[in-house]
Amino acid sequence: MKIKHQIAFFFLVILSCNAQSSDSIFFGKKADKLSYKQFIVPTALLSSGLVVKSLSSNKTLQGDIRKILGVDFHTKADNYLQYEAIAQIYGGKLLGFKPKNDVLHQTINIVIANSIMCGLVITFKHSFKEERPDNSNALSFPSGHTATAFTNASLLYYEYKDSNIWYASSGFLFATTTGFLRIANNKHYTSDVLAGAGIGLGVGMIVSYWNPFKSINLSKNKTHAIIYPQVGKNYGIGLLIYK
């Protein structure tokens, strides 16, 4: 398979989740209930990751994609882009879009979704013990950065899909870019990124429809909660609660 066909396949699989986002297969726009159809895309991505992982062409595809930006390419942008959708979730209202939840419940959804996602990713990483392309450790499969990006992109979509479909879907573009940069940085194979995207989409969707603690109302006390990315030697999420 020629490099241009390999790269086109990679983006086609990843971006398919964005194309499905306005259809009932992903997040039903009229009914706020989960159905098996909505798990088709997350399952397909995770399954694709598992299948591609076992193919000899996995390493070839990773090498071919890296040639786009050069084998010496390196950036830290993916460390920040994985949290980009969180900023959009909080900032959408300021831009005039109507979210489904207030700041408190947005924060609850973000914290719970990212916690579940992290638990799954860590479990997968230590179960498969896949060596990274750069041989830095054996925690390659699946991509945590990609899973984080798609988890938050899913939450963003649910928050604003009824207000502005383009704004709601924009997080998937940044999430896909995050996955691409993980490969370009020689930190992950295509299989890792596909699986990470599948996990992120699935978790984000479930938590969005579950909407935990939705009955909590602290407006009388004017209590607010905001989460923010922590970037430094370690990457994670911080929680700020204030009145």
Image (cartoon, helix red, strand yellow):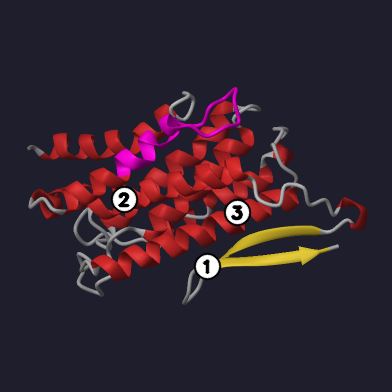
Residue ID at (48%, 24%) = 24
Work out whether mark 3 precedes mark 1 in sequence or the reverse, and give the earlier one.
3
Label 3 with label 1: CB-CB less than 8 Å: no
Distance Cα–Cα, label 2 vs label 1: 20 Å
Say above or below: 105 vs 125: above
Q: Which x, y percent locates residue 136?
A: 25, 74
State yes or no: residue 233 in magenta. no
Label 1 belongs to which residue? 236
Q: Secondary structure at mark 1?
A: strand
Residue nearer the viewer, 100 or 9: 100
Label 2 belongs to which residue? 195
Give the magenta-colored segment's residue range: 26-45
Note whether residue 65 is visible. Answer: no
Q: Which amino acid type is shown beneath numbered disc 1?
A: Gly
Residue ID at (45%, 64%) = 119
State yes or no: residue 30 in magenta. yes
Q: Which amino acid type is shown beneath numbered disc 2?
A: Ala
Label 3 belongs to which residue? 110
Say above or below: 138 vs 148: below
Find residue 125 and report its image quarter. Answer: bottom left
